[in-house]
Amino acid sequence: MAHHVTDADFAAEVLNSSEPVLVDFWAEWCGPCKAMDPILEQVAIDLAGKVKIVKLDVDSNPGTVTQYHVRAMPTMIVFKDGQPADVKVGAGQSRAQLTKWLESHTA
């Protein structure tokens, strides 16, 4: 299961991570977010040790949401060396597509 982060631990868990981190900005009421959950869970297993995958509830963590200008759910941002490296907005990525995208940030 993906690790959940909050405004309070975002810097420690994401910005200070030694490996790339995919942050899934999601909401409980978001159907497409829930549809992506099983795919993200599998990708987290597939890429364990290469990419960390975390989830941030947009309703409970407005500071981080505002800071990174997240306006639609789901939004997935890859952070590398403490900085946003790439963004995908919306659901619809397959496991293979998501894996390939994330692997491009592990080099």
Image (spheres, rainbow, N blue to C red):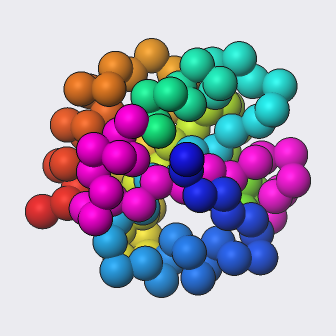
Q: Is residue 12 left or right of residue 100?
A: right
The percent position of residue 6, horizontal first and vertical second, equals 74, 65
The percent position of residue 51, horizontal first and vertical second, equals 33, 59
For the view shown, which residue lies furthest in the right direction?
60
The percent position of residue 53, horizontal first and vertical second, equals 46, 54
Q: Quadrant of residue 105?
A: bottom left
- Please name the residue shown 17% across and 49% down the image: 104
Q: Is 28 located above or below residue 21 in the figure?
A: above
- Residue 93 in the magenta stretch? The answer is no
Q: Is residue 36 left or right of residue 106?
A: right
- Please name the residue shown 24% across and 26% down the image: 96
Residue 102 visible (yes or no): no
The percent position of residue 85, horizontal first and vertical second, equals 36, 58
Q: Is 27 located above or below residue 53 in the figure?
A: above
Residue 91 visible (yes or no): yes
- Residue 52 in the magenta stretch? The answer is yes
Q: Quadrant of residue 19?
A: bottom left
Q: Is residue 97 left or right of residue 64?
A: left
Residue nearest the viewer, comparing 69 with 36: 36
Q: Is residue 23 left or right of residue 62?
A: left
Q: Is 64 located above or below residue 65 in the figure?
A: below
Q: Is 37 located above or below residue 61 in the figure?
A: above
Quarter of the image for the C terminus: give it: bottom left
- Please name the residue shown 39% across and 36% down the image: 42
Which range of residues does the magenta coloring cover? 42-63
Callout count:
0
